[in-house]
Structures are given as structure tokens and as C-alpha cells.
Amino acid sequence: MSDTSTADAATDTNGWAFGNADEMEWQQLSEFVSMKLLGVADDKGIGLFKFAPGYQGGVHQHVAAEFGYVLEGSVIANGVTLAAGEAYAAQTGTQHHEGPCEGATLLSVFTIPT
């Protein structure tokens, strides 16, 4: 006897977003920052960010938790240098300052600005 409810649930993609980074173009956000927005659900996004050498981010306040994982290169977050394979998790209400940067690609989960 098979369980059709499990099979149906495994193929139900309503409410899901899927992205293939290899099929997406980099979107230029500023002189030093490009992004590939891989998916959005509710008010959260997951994206790849490419920071060019010389990037110096401004200070911003986190309205929700934010997560980052360095895929290549290195970036400085709040005075801490993060290299490939390292990550950060920032709690709601914390301030965030990035840079200076020697160049990096970062995977991030963040709140979509309104």
C-alpha cells in the first residue's frame, strides 16, 4: 500500500521559489556590489553578493536577523575579517558595517528592504 499524501507533498511547489545561480546574470547594485537574488519568501531573501576590491559598506541597522557565508575571498564585518568558509549571524537590532574589502563572494539570507 502506498502513501499518496506523502508523494503529493513531495511534489507540491506552491509557495516555493527556486533559483539557479548559474543561469542568472549579476545585477549591479553599486560600483562595488553585484547580486544574484536566488529566492524570496515572505520578507526574506537569499542571495549571492559579489564585493569588488575597495568596497566599503555603510553602517545599517538590522531590522531582522541576517546571515552570511563567505564563498571566496574575504570581507570585514564589524572589524572581523571573514575568509572563505567562514560565516556570521547578526541578531535583530545590531549595527552592521562592512569593509574595507579585498574582494569576496558572499551567500546571504536577509530581510528584503521595503
Image (cartoon, helix red, strand yellow):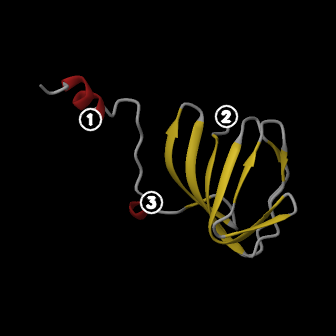
**Residue 93 versus residue 23 in the image, above or below:** above
Please identify the quadrant where the N terminus is shown: top left
Q: Position of residue 49 (x, y in %)?
A: 61, 60
Say left or right for 52 vs 71. Answer: right
Say left or right for 76 vs 20. Answer: right
User: What SS does tag 3 mark?
Assistant: helix
Residue 19: which numbered mark, if any?
Answer: none
**Residue 42 versus residue 75 in the image, above or below:** above
Q: Where is residue 5 in the image (x, y as percent from the top left)?
A: 24, 23
Say left or right for 34 vs 8. Answer: right
**Residue 5 versus residue 111 in the image, above or below:** above
**Residue 38 versus residue 102 in the image, above or below:** above
The residue singled out by tag 3 in the image is: 21
Q: Position of residue 22 (x, y in %)?
A: 41, 64
Q: What residue type is labelled 1?
A: Thr
The residue singled out by tag 2 in the image is: 114
